Image (cartoon, rainbow, N blue to C red):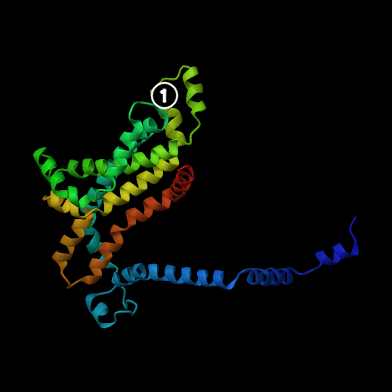
């Protein structure tokens, strides 16, 4: 049963309601909160400025960049992207293949070792795990020369395997840490019920552990793929053949080839080389955030 008060409340226009809500929101925000929002907006703008500058400069000629540094391209030189893609497409394909191969190896090995450390018991398990974590404290530059000598003696230098195996080995420790932290939160009753029903250990792993661990595995894949794709020092040291080189080193060769006479093409190459990373993070962002938040809560 409606009263006159209810009828009057319903007759209030949406504009007045919106103004009332806006006033309440502004009143709710304190001065420190407004300051934080403004600072965050400034930080976001500062982060986007280099990207926007790269895109704008990629459409300029050398004279436009030197003559009007902050101006817009007039006219835009879209052929810069064609020339850049022709020069770096081989390096991009190599980097994508190396990143996918190394990340797949890391996911497979880290999921197995993480499951063993999380759900299995054996003597010295905690000591072995702590020793693995201690290896994360060693800077990679200290093992650069010994690693090169090892791979060179194995005959793997100047081959794709030197990138894939090194990437898989380098991400194994952190991957095991993430998988162990995530898988320790999976109820052990699921595994016991599956074993009672006659499931083998391999079936338990691939049909229970892997599907439930997809968020952390996707997170690990993205992190490892980005690391291998952006690696510069190790491929520069171990790869001599230009046809096997990665995009990070290929961009420097590209720069030496064109020099400073065509900076617009150089910026176009930078923009093109970032596309695979943007795509992989765009499609896996949901699982990446889910894996990071769930892994943090379970630690």
The quarter of the image holding the C terminus is top left
- Residue depicted at x 34% and y 31%: 125
Q: Is residue 103 visible?
A: no
Q: Quadrant of residue 33?
A: bottom right
Q: Is residue 121 above or below residue 111?
A: above
The quarter of the image holding the N terminus is bottom right
Q: Is residue 134 above or below residue 55?
A: above
- Residue depicted at x 22% and y 76%: 62
Residue 278 point in image, percent of width and height: 37, 56
Q: Is residue 99 left or right of residue 9?
A: left
Residue 266 point in image, percent of width and height: 23, 66
Instruction: Classify 10 Å Cα crowding around label 1: few (below 14), some (14-19), many (20 and above).
Output: few
Q: Is residue 163 visible?
A: yes
Q: Which residue is mark 1?
A: 203
Q: Is residue 72 above or below residue 251?
A: below
Residue 281 point in image, percent of width and height: 39, 52
Closer-to-camera residue (119/204): 119
Q: Is residue 232 left or right of residue 75?
A: left
Q: Is residue 277 left or right of residue 194?
A: left
């Amino acid at each position: 049963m409606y009263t006159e008060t209810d009828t009057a409340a319903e007759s209030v226009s949406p504009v007045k309601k919106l103004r009332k809500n806006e006033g309440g929101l502004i009143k709710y925000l304190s001065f420190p909160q407004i300051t934080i929002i403004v600072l965050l907006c400034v930080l976001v703008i500062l982060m986007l400025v280099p990207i926007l500058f790269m895109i704008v400069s990629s459409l300029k000629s050398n004279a436009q960049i030197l003559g009007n540094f902050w101006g817009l391209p007039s006219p835009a030189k879209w052929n810069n992207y064609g020339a850049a893609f022709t020069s770096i497409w081989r390096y991009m394909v190599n980097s994508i293949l190396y990143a996918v191969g190394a990340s797949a190896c890391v996911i497979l090995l880290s999921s197995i070792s993480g499951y063993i450390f999380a759900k299995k018991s054996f003597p010295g398990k905690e000591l072995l795990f702590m020793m693995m974590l201690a290896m994360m404290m060693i800077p990679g530059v200290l093992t650069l020369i010994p690693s090169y000598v090892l791979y060179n003696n194995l005959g793997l230098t100047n081959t794709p395997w030197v990138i894939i195996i090194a990437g898989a080995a380098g991400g194994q420790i952190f991957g095991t840490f993430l998988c162990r932290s995530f898988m320790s939160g999976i109820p052990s009753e699921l595994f016991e019920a599956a074993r009672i029903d006659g499931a083998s250990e391999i079936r338990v792993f691939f049909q229970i552990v892997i599907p439930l661990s997809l968020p952390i595995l996707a997170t690990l894949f993205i992190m490892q793929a980005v690391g291998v794709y952006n690696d510069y020092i190790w491929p520069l040291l171990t790869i001599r053949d230009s046809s096997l080189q990665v995009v990070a080193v290929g961009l420097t060769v590209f720069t030496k080839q064109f020099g400073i006479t065509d900076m617009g093409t150089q910026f176009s190459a930078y923009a093109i080389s970032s596309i695979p990373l943007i795509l992989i993070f765009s499609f896996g962002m949901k699982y990446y955030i889910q894996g990071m938040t769930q892994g943090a809560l379970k630690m």
